[in-house]
Image (cartoon, grey):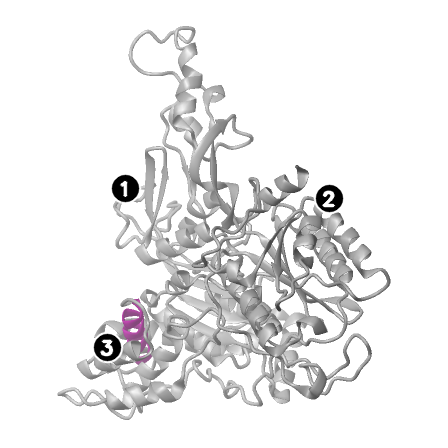
């Protein structure tokens, strides 16, 4: 809509509003990463902030929004003459998930540069966002190399575009805001660290507050202009307060006591590097300016830690996010104290504005009981209809806990794919080693210089070139073919039947699957989970980029009953069929975790063989993790692997440091089967 929702009308979400306002006061804080479930006003708050920001003065006609008072000396549109600037609203630029590298950083016309000697540059979204806000919804779904470019520009305040020796540099200083739903996958730790602050948001569980959210939203949808007019006074007050805090910011004093507390807090939570200390210092300074004070207090340091450290603390991929506030308070108290001039005070500054709490009688911070999250599986019955006293199966025992995860060897899909960039299987990608060249299909993006020269060389005499130099025409240009690695869909098909239910054995099985999930996390894969027991199979987790959710479902996996192996394989086949329609470029890798027994339903062995051959006929890469134990081994998992056209490995052989040698490649198993 043309009339944005007022920032001060957002109900609750105090941490989110405060983090955004601190970045508005001091863009050097480094942006905000907003994590939370859908429908929690993430996008609404960001768009509302843009309307709240003071207007920006720019050089008229400059595509890079240079400041008339201090224009960029290397601006591609410069040099700029001294003349009055034009005022405009603060720019809000949204980066779509499917954006290309050229759309983000801009594009050099390589064809004109080589053929005509013209350095033509078309600015990208980073140029549009200069001195404004760059909003990236679902930042965790962006390709990794785009996130790298985005965060590098945010850290350096400039964007560099280089294509075969032709380069352009322009300023790119912006307030970076990213939003993500953790259930759809996480960012890599080194990318999380580049965001200044992080905020976890969730819908309120307080009925009165939820009612107020609905009431305001309906009023806005019915009459946006009228609704915005009712909040105009509060919006103006916050806008003035942002301006006042910006003016006060250079005068804020960060004393030695506050610096000691910052350093001690970062050390106590074992954050890597020094970026956390710097961000905390800038955030605490912005908090003091926002409160109208010129001294940083202990309460500012505490609030800065809660915003700047949760995504930086050292933790395992499946650990819950957040900060231990008791430990934080102990650290601040231990290293507290006063500066020589008594800078540490009681914090009685002016702090009655919109963050947290908001102006104009905004609601108090969210109350009510915290969300209960994913509840454990409730008692039910096993596949044979025998009642279970609890999720663990007979006897009401809790599900077996996974054994300690380990580093696994690489399981990959044979051949060369064209899927999303990752770290598992070979693929043709935008980045990687150059393996060949071809005529460009569409716009030229990666020039293969040697192939281009080779194509142009035979025509030089016909083109009238008698002296040094080379005449290159459009038909001579060659696109580089590059090979890197892609991410895959790793679909786990886990046998949860009674034959797998021995607690020590199931713990080892879960440990092996958890280890493979960790490997999928590192390699940027999507994962899915199909389980089978009793008389049927179910999709415990549809394909997702969140290995955290997969690990949680695995931990609470119920066991017991017969082994409907055919049902599990057929359900996996159906999941893959649907996923191919959604994402045809992403190749699957099916990991079947079983002892190979098939006892559920009529003719279980024959049906399991037919289901396995169905997957093999479609060329699906499969690995069977053989969980058979005991002194007498039937070799059923190995036979299943042969039917699938894949390979069988034991949990011990999955270990990266095992003495069993390199895990057998899927292609090798197919070759043996064909022979």
Q: Examine the structure image and report whether residue 560 is included in the region drawn in magenta.
A: no
Q: In the visual, does 489 lie left or right of 65?
A: right
User: Which numbered tag is attached to residue 579?
Assistant: none
Say if residue 170 shows up in the picture. Answer: yes
Q: Where, by quadrant of the figure, is residue 571 drawn?
A: bottom right
638 is higher (above) or lower (below) than 466: below
The residue lying at 49 percent from left, 46 percent from top is: 485
Q: CA distance from mark 1 to mark 3?
A: 35 Å
464 is higher (above) or lower (below) than 46: above
- Residue at the limit of the structure toward the front, as seen here: 631
Q: Are marks 1 and 3 in contact (CB under 8 Å)?
A: no
According to the image, label 3 marks what residue?
252
How many residues crowd mark 3 within 10 Å: few (<14), some (14–19), many (20+)? some
The residue lying at 72 percent from left, 87 percent from top is: 389
What stretch of residues is rendered in magenta?
A: 275-288
According to the image, label 2 marks what residue?
617
Task: Tell which circle, 1 or 3, labels the residue nearer the N-terminal end.
Answer: 1
How many residues crowd mark 1 within 10 Å: few (<14), some (14–19), many (20+)? few
The residue lying at 33 percent from left, 58 percent from top is: 155
User: Which numbered tag is attached to residue 79?
Assistant: 1
- Dot 2 lies on which element? helix
Task: Tell which circle, 2 or 1, labels the residue nearer the N-terminal end.
Answer: 1
The percent position of residue 159, horizontal first and vertical second, equals 35, 48
């Amino acid at each position: 809509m043309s009339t944005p929702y007022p920032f001060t009308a957002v109900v609750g979400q105090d941490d989110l509003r405060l983090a955004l306002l601190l970045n508005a006061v001091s863009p050097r804080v480094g942006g905000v990463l907003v994590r939370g479930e859908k429908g929690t006003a993430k996008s609404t708050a960001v768009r509302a902030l843009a309307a709240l920001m003071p207007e920006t003065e720019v050089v008229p006609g400059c595509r890079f929004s240079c400041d008339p008072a201090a224009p960029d000396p290397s601006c591609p549109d410069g040099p700029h003459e001294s003349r009055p600037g034009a005022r405009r609203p603060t720019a809000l630029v949204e980066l779509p998930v499917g954006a290309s590298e050229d759309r983000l950083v801009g594009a050099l016309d390589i064809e004109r540069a080589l053929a005509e000697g013209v350095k033509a540059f078309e600015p990208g979204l980073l140029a549009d966002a200069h001195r404004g806000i760059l909003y990236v919804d679902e930042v965790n779904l962006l390709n990794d190399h785009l996130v790298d470019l985005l965060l590098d520009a945010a850290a350096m305040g400039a964007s560099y575009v280089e294509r075969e020796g032709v380069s352009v540099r322009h300023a790119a200083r912006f307030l970076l805001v990213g939003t993500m739903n953790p259930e759809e996958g996480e960012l890599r730790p080194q990318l999380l660290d580049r965001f200044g602050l992080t905020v976890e948001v969730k819908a309120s569980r307080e009925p009165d507050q939820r009612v107020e959210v609905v009431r305001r939203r309906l009023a806005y949808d019915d009459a946006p202009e009228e609704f915005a007019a009712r909040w105009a006074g509060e919006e103006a007050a916050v806008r003035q307060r942002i301006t006042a805090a910006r003016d006060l910011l250079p005068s804020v004093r960060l004393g030695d006591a506050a610096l000691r507390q910052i350093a001690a807090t970062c050390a106590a939570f074992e954050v890597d590097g020094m970026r956390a200390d710097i961000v905390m210092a800038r955030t605490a300074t912005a908090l003091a300016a926002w409160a109208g004070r010129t001294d940083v207090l202990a309460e500012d340091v505490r609030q800065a830690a809660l915003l700047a450290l949760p995504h930086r603390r050292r933790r395992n991929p499946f650990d819950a996010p957040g900060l231990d506030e008791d430990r934080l308070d102990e650290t601040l108290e231990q290293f507290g104290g006063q500066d020589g001039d008594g800078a540490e005070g009681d914090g009685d500054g002016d702090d009655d504005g919109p963050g947290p709490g908001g102006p104009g009688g905004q609601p108090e911070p969210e109350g009510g009981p915290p969300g209960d999250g994913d509840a454990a599986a409730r008692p039910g019955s096993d596949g044979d209809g025998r009642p279970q006293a609890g999720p663990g199966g007979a006897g009401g025992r809790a599900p077996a806990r996974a054994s300690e995860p380990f580093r696994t060897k690489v399981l990959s899909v044979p051949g060369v794919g064209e899927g999303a960039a990752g770290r598992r299987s070979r693929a043709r990608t935008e980045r990687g080693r150059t393996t060949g060249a071809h005529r460009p299909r569409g716009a030229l993006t990666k020039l293969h210089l040697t192939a281009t020269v080779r194509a142009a060389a035979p025509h030089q005499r016909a083109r009238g070139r008698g002296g040094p130099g080379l005449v290159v025409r459009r038909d001579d240009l060659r696109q580089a073919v590059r090979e890197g690695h892609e991410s895959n869909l790793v679909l786990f098909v886990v046998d949860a039947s009674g034959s797998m239910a021995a607690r020590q054995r199931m713990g080892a099985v879960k440990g092996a699957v958890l280890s493979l999930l960790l490997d999928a996390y590192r390699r940027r894969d999507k994962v899915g989970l199909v389980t089978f027991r009793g008389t049927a199979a179910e999709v415990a987790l549809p394909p997702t980029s969140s290995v955290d959710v997969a690990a949680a479902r695995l931990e609470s996996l119920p066991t017991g009953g017969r082994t409907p192996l055919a049902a599990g394989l057929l359900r996996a086949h159906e999941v893959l069929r649907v996923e191919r329609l959604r994402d045809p470029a992403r190749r699957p890798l099916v990991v079947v975790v079983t002892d190979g027994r098939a006892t559920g339903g009529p003719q279980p062995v024959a049906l399991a063989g037919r289901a396995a051959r169905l997957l093999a006929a479609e060329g699906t890469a499969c690995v069977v993790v053989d969980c058979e134990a005991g002194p007498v081994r039937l070799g059923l998992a190995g036979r299943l692997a042969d039917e699938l056209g894949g390979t069988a490995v034991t949990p011990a052989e999955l270990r990266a440091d095992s003495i069993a040698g390199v895990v057998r490649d899927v292609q090798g198993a197919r070759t043996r089967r064909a022979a």
